[in-house]
Image (cartoon, rainbow, N blue to C red):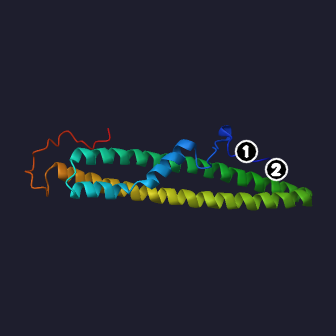
Amino acid sequence: LGMRPALDDPAAGHHQDGVGGHRLGEQVRDRERRPPFGDRVRGSLEGGVPLGQVDDTLDDVMGVLDDLREGVEVTRKRVERERSELETVRRRKGLAQKVGDAETVSVAERFESQQAERLAVLESKLNAQESELAVVEREVAEMKEQLKAALAGVGSGMRAGTVDMAQDPLDDG
């Protein structure tokens, strides 16, 4: 039936922290310690913080988005590997059933159960990560619109047109 690679086997795509690498795990922990970026940007726009600092915060958020996207991709690949492994276990169980090898069938059933549970957990994790990414992407879009409005002087008491909007400071390119 084959052995599963150790979690610290980089050749198998597994990493020591079980999440997708030390760097990603550290970034997630750092993100969890900071207030939500929406609160930071909103507070900056409402609290009279210089817009350059708000723009810097938005730049940080874009890095967080990249990290979230990377995490989703890592988990998606793990889900694919686990699905493939589950198919292999089921195929082997079927072969053992055909030849009437009760002991191998029993072992295969145990591995099938473990593999199915592992896959269910990873699919749940992927779903949660994709949901989090969607929320953050919506918040970023909202923050960009608020910052663009602030830069254009909308609602700030500044005259419209005092900032050159031809050069979009929020352009990702």
Q: CA distance from mark 1 to mark 2?
A: 13 Å
Q: Secondary structure at mark 1?
A: loop
Q: Estimate the x, y position of residue 39 in percent, counting from the top left.
A: 32, 59
Residue at x 50% of width, y 51% of height:
29
Identity, as a three-letter code, of the amino acid under mark 2: Leu
Q: Estimate the x, y position of residue 117 in percent, counting from the top left.
A: 69, 61
* Closer to the camera in the image, 60 or 92: 60
Q: Residues within 10 Å of mark 1 (few under 14, many from 20)?
A: few
Q: Residues within 10 Å of mark 2 (few under 14, many from 20)?
A: few
Residue 130 vertical placement versus 7 (above, below): below
Identity, as a three-letter code, of the amino acid under mark 1: Pro
Q: According to the image, label 1 marks what residue?
A: 5
Residue at x 75% of width, y 51% of height:
88
**Relative to 37, is 16 on the left or the right?**
right
Instruction: Tell me the number on the disc at residue 1.
Output: 2
Residue 53 vertical placement versus 91 (above, below): above
**Relative to 6, is 108 on the left or the right?**
right
Q: Estimate the x, y position of residue 38 in percent, counting from the top left.
A: 33, 57
* Closer to the camera in the image, 148 or 95: 148
* Closer to the camera in the image, 18 or 141: 18
